[in-house]
Amino acid sequence: MELAKADSLKEELMASNPEFRELAREHGRYEERLSELSALTYPSDEEQVEEVTLKKKKLALKDQMYSLMLQHEKVASTEH
């Protein structure tokens, strides 16, 4: 999926799809926390585990968002 089309599709889904919106919000929260953790000079063992876990969760959310984008694109293409 080309970048401009993906960005347009994200904007459309943010406006029209509550599930996509919630996934995007959660993704943003994970991103914020990851930024906080990466700024730590000497993270504890727990913080290091949290960082790895959040990266995996964030990636899973991104996959879910992409799946919704593909579904939406498929539906839109069959309607035209």
Image (spheres, grey):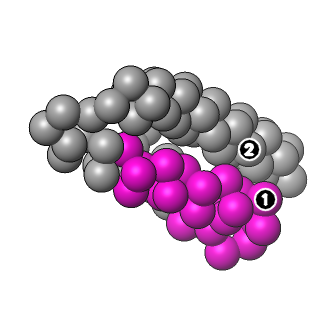
Q: Quadrant of residue 48?
A: top left
Residue 68, labelled with which disc?
2
Which residue is denoted by mark 1 in the rendering? 19
Badge 2 marks a residue whose secondary structure is helix
Q: Mark 2, mark 1: which one is toward the viewer?
A: 1
Q: Position of residue 45 (x, y in %)?
A: 38, 24
Query: Foreground residue, 43 or 5?
Result: 43
From this view, report whether residue 66 is shown above or below residue 17. above
Tag 2 near tag 1, CB within 8 Å:
yes
Instruction: Please say whether residue 70 is one of the residues in the magenta stretch.
Output: no
From this view, report whether residue 70 is shown above or below residue 28. above
Query: Foreground residue, 57 or 64?
Result: 57
Give the mark nearer the N terminus: 2 vs 1: 1
Q: Is residue 28 visible?
A: yes
Q: In the visual, does 50 lie left or right of 60?
A: left
Q: Position of residue 67 (x, y in %)?
A: 71, 35
Does the magenta stretch mainly form a helix, a strand or a loop? helix
Question: Mark 1 belongs to which amino acid?
Answer: Glu
Question: Mark 2 belongs to which amino acid?
Answer: Leu
Q: Specify the segment rendered in magenta.
A: 11-34
Q: Residue at image x 63%, y 40%?
A: 61
Q: Residue at image x 76%, y 65%?
A: 17
Q: In the visual, does 69 lie left or right of 28?
A: right
Q: Residue at image x 70%, y 37%?
A: 64
Measured in 3D between alpha carbons, the distance from the residue under mark 2 to the one under mark 1, in whole angstroms, is 9 Å
Q: Residue at image x 54%, y 28%?
A: 53
Q: Tag 2: Cα neighbours inside 10 Å, few (<14), some, or many (≥20)?
A: some
